[in-house]
Amino acid sequence: MNPATPASGSNEMGWGSDVAAQLLRDLGFRYVALNPGASFRGLHDSLVNYLGDADPKMVLCLHEEHAVGIAHGWAKVTGEPMAVVLHSNVGLMHGSMAIFNAWCDRVPMLILGATGPVDAARRRPWIDWIHTATDQAALVRSFIKWDNQPASVPAMVEALLRADRLTRSGPPAPVYVCLDAALQEDPLQRPPALPQPRRFAAPAPSRPDAAALAAALQQLQAAERPVILAGKGARTTEAWTNRVRLAERLGAAVLTDLKAGAAFPTDHPLHAAPMFNFLSGPARAVLQQADLLLALDWIDLGGTLKQAWPAEAPPVPVIEVTLDHQLHHGASMEHQGLAAVDHPLAGDPDATVAELLAALGPAPARAGWHAASSPPPPAAPARHVTLSAVAAALRDAVEDPDLVSFVALSRGWPDQAWPLRHPLSYLGKDGGGGVGSGLGISIGAALALRGTGRLPVAVLGDGDVSMGINALWTAAHDGIPLLILVNNNRSYLNDELHQEGVARRRGRDPSRRWIGQRMDDPALDFAKLAEAQGVEAIGPVSRPEDVPAAIARALQVVQAGRPCLIDLLCPPGAERDLNEASGGRPAP
């Protein structure tokens, strides 16, 4: 990490960009992630020489996609937005996939864009013309919550205040404010009187209509076999404890989703089936025995119900608590299938759980009607490195497994072998399925976890890591402790499984599924690629007996405050079927 550079020159507010920088500080932004660009050179100067690169401090990235990913990971841990700056139209295009991930994952984020001077008379030849757009936000408008391009300093103040309020309001999602380069660089006639941000704060979380809540509560109290689908929720111990209390009060079976992250302790007697991506056999059996369903901001409720009852609407009452419908439009299908719901409760899921608990009042917990899933049998010794062996070695090596935060998990991770007992035990997936997002999101989450005493661990596939490897430079540069375990099968194995499924359906040779999928000949050396970014790395580790020593060495590095990567060579077929291991279904 470079030593802090003291602010130089005049520290008086004198330029348009100084106003934007001051507002970021007043609004409480601690970091701003960026890759440099001339379209926001005015703002860059204000962050460095007016604010002194503190509150917010710059997080320098080698690609705009990583800058957005880091802000995404930060929000997954804190529930708060990080600021991101993207250079003109080209930087916005670079960052667009990561913005889509953040949109699908419903996380807050303040994205500042910039355009070459809107006034054509002020554009430099060539470069300012190709970096100026008449409607730059149109590139991402279908997957952001709100956008604005202010034309004056007072308008910029209002735009930033509104953007901050909207991104923090439920349901959260990224917002985009584009700053004209000329507006940034024009001198101020006089410094504006900036308003107090607290007067523009986001409202308290929404709660459902009282009559609708009372009707749903009556059905919950009458249910004998209720099931709670615990989806997205706050990463706070209060929200976590309330979900547990509600399940115990109702004696409800609970199901959780690998896409959403830890929402309920997975070794609790009421946790009725392993976490899943697609509905697993055990989870389907639980749903089919239920006499009522309570969905708490569940991802793809319609798809889940269709998997449980393919030929009919759910034969039991369904209560859905969500605000997600407020973001739905026709440009993107991330809203998923339309679910048949008997009691739609428009409200924040955690606030609604608190309301339900208050309405239920003090009473003894009811016995659960469904037995918890049994843990898997111990894995047989493997001839190759497997994720099961990696999980066992990591569990033996850490002092307290409950202080591990899995900021990412690849397919095949044996989640049943590692109970999740804290809201930060596992942060869920990237939202939009954009390959290459894992390292950026993991680094942002690790930045948010730095100093908390928790150990951030990212288990990532080789295809994902290969696309985002230079995000590691930021982790090395800023001293962000993070353990990265690369599940390296030298293939886009998920796609291999898809190709095998297609070949079998067509009566063709499934053994050729690897063609156009394998990342071999030459094999990628992830340890050397990581070392080239300044990150200590180990591997490739190809023998199971070498895994414990590699993990022990890596933990020493991370505990010293630095990132470390282990390249784990897990050949295709060494682990049991990856879809079954993740609680999913066979490749189509």
Image (tube, rainbow, N blue to C red):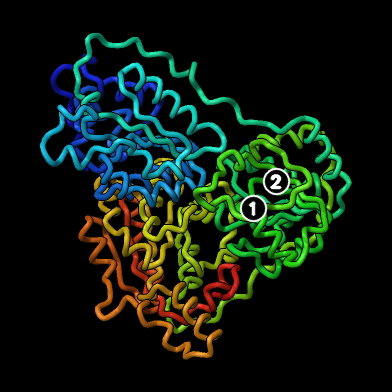
Disc 2 marks which amino acid? Val
Image vertical order of residue 154 relative to residue 175, above or below: above
Q: Which residue is mark 2?
A: 244
Foreground of the two, 163 or 530 = 163
Side (left or right) of 555 relative to 427: left
Q: Quadrant of residue 177?
A: top left
Categorize mark 2 by other alpha carbons within 10 Å: few (<14), some (14-19), many (20+). some
What type is the residue that disc 1 sits on?
Pro
* For residue 33, above or below residue 225: above
Pointer 1: what residue?
265
| Image-quadrant location for residue 546 | bottom left
Residue 117, percent across and down? 21, 30
Instruction: Residue at 59%, 47% (x, y): give it.
Output: 232
The x and y percentages for residue 395 are: 50, 63
> In the image, what residue occupies the spot 24% across and 25% down?
184
Marks 2/1 in contact by CB < 8 Å: the verdict is: yes
Task: Check the picture and name the quadrant holding the N terminus.
Answer: top left
